[in-house]
Image (cartoon, rainbow, N blue to C red):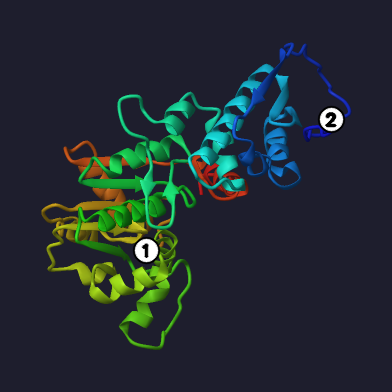
Amino acid sequence: MARKPVREAQPAFSPSPRPQRQIRRAQVDLSFENQSLLGVLFGQFDANLVQVENRLGVFISARGNQLHVEGPEDSVARARDVLNAMYDRLALGQDLDQGAIEALIAMSDEPTLDGIMDADLKGPPIMIRTRRKTIVPRSATQATYMRSLVRDDIIFALGPAGTGKTYLAVAQAVAQLISGSVQRLILSRPAVEAGEKLGFLPGDMKDKVDPYLRPLYDALYDCMPPEQVERRLASGEIEIAPIAFMRGRTLADSFIILDEAQNTTREQMKMFLTRFGQNSRMVVCGDPRQVDIPGGDRMSGLADAVEKLEGVEGFGTIRFTSADVVRHPIVGRIVEAYEGRGE
């Protein structure tokens, strides 16, 4: 292999050159026992190896079941951890796509990588098993969030789009519904337009509110076979409804998720939280920087609830940042750009 990692262009002139710290270079050899996994590990035309090379600034050559990695000492250490984690993921029967590799690369810069992949030495592996897939955390914050989902009664998940707040909550809810630890799964969100008026929507009540709830359906279908989703929706085991339909109810033996919670008013949030019943768990997801209701941040029920309840026994608060974005890497850069300008 004769590839070289992509390098950023350097300026032609430097008005005030400074002495550069000498970068120590290193190399390491890796070998993998199960050769049947190598095709998926390397990727088509070695695309996975190229991705690691370009992101970490190293050079990787392959021969048989061995890889040779060269480059700056820190980058070689990170590449070694990423490649081993990629192989371990495949050995466990988990998928390995571009997003998963990008997440492993991001986590390799954190001291918790081994803990995330191999699990806390004092506990079981951190994962959520559903009928369609096994989900593992893609950042240290996601690992903390997944622990909170099985420990705390009510969880506030705060942060930008693409960090997995709602998806992981739905996956945990599906896992508990399948295991029988809860009897119902209730998904809700406020029916608020994001910066535009949709006007009159045709159809019955379900047709009118479904467009607002589509992200919840998407997460459900990703975790369960479509026929099971439809059957459980018809039987009432899974209920998807706008927050306005929650008043007056007591939600026992249920896993309850409120999405886009930043668009609730203080009165709506108080009403929703007090629906909590016996043997239930509640997750409240939202991005405090994306408030679409009149009055903006000062009227948001999410910020008010977190301020009042953070630290109270039984409540967990998880804060995601742009570093936890698990969609395309450019989404993280978009979030950083907007947050950097304070928008």
* Residue type, mark 2 in image: Pro
Task: Bin the neighbour count of mark 1 within 10 Å (Cα to Cα): few under 14, some 14-19, many 20 and up.
Answer: some
In depth, the one of 61 and 26 nearer the eye is 61
Q: Is residue 148 above or below residue 176?
A: above
Mark identifier at residue 293? 1
The N terminus, quarter of image: top right
Counting from the top left corner in percent of width and height, residue 101 is at 59, 41
Q: Which residue is mark 2?
A: 11
The residue positioned 40% from the left and 50% from the top of the image is 165
Image position, residue 265 (x, y; %)? 27, 60
**Toward the viewer: 111 or 330?**
111
Q: Is residue 160 left or right of residue 103?
A: left
Residue depicted at 26% across the width and 58% down the height: 177
Density class for disc 2 (Cα within 10 Å; few <14, some 14-19, many ≥20) is: few
Q: Amino acid at mark 1?
A: Ile
Which residue is painted at 48% across and 29% down in the image? 113
